[in-house]
Image (spheres, rainbow, N blue to C red):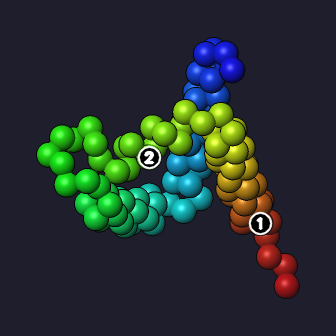
């Protein structure tokens, strides 16, 4: 695999994550998204503490090592990129449908 192709997929994945987070903030609202992020951060911190090696070297954290290993695998990165963009499109479609329904007057 060429280095430029891998770098392009990494950038596409990163942009997809950013767009997915922004779309989630719009759909869920700031407070609900902040709560989800806080709980997820707490869970990751606890898992990192339990599953890491006990070394004082910060570069040997379980989470960082796993992420570095996973992002260098071509098939995983392709799948993750498609999954992130699919989730982003679903959230965007849901928000568009919700906005359309909110704009329609109720005549019952």
* Residue at 18% in and 48% down: 55
Of discs 1 and 2, which sits in the foreground?
2
Report the front residue among 14 and 80: 80
Instruction: Give the labeled residue for mark 1.
Output: 101
Q: Is residue 22 left or right of residue 57?
A: right
Which image quadrant for residue 103?
A: bottom right
- Whether residue 21 is visible to the viewer of this picture, yes or no, is yes
Report the front residue among 76 and 27: 76
* Gap in angstroms between the C-alphas marked 1 and 2: 42 Å
Which image quadrant for residue 95?
A: bottom right
Report the front residue among 27 and 73: 73
Circle number at residue 69: none
Height in image: 67 above or below 29?
above
Task: Please provide percent x and percent y for residue 10.
Answer: 58, 29
Task: Mark 1: give few (<14), some (14-19) or many (20+) Cα within 10 Å.
Answer: few
Task: Please provide percent x and percent y for residue 59.
Answer: 26, 38
* Residue at 59% in and 21% down: 7
Residue, far left:
56
Height in image: 80 above or below 27?
above
Task: Please provide percent x and percent y for residue 48.
Answer: 31, 57
Q: In this view, does 4 lie to the left or right of 40?
A: right
Task: Mark 2: give few (<14), some (14-19) or many (20+) Cα within 10 Å.
Answer: few
Q: In the rendered image, which quarter contains the N terminus? A: top right
Circle number at residue 66: 2
Q: In the rendered image, which quarter contains the C terminus? A: bottom right
Task: Please provide percent x and percent y for residue 36.
Answer: 43, 65
């Amino acid at each position: 695999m060429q280095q430029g192709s891998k770098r392009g997929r990494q950038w596409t994945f990163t942009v997809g994550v950013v767009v997915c987070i922004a779309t989630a903030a719009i759909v869920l609202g700031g407070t609900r998204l902040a709560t989800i992020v806080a709980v997820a951060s707490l869970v990751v911190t606890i898992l990192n503490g339990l599953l890491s090696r006990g070394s004082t070297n910060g570069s040997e954290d379980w989470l960082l090592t796993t992420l570095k290993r996973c992002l260098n695998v071509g098939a995983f990165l392709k799948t993750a990129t498609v999954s992130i963009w699919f989730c982003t499109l679903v959230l965007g479609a849901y928000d568009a449908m919700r906005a359309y329904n909110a704009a329609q007057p109720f005549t019952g």
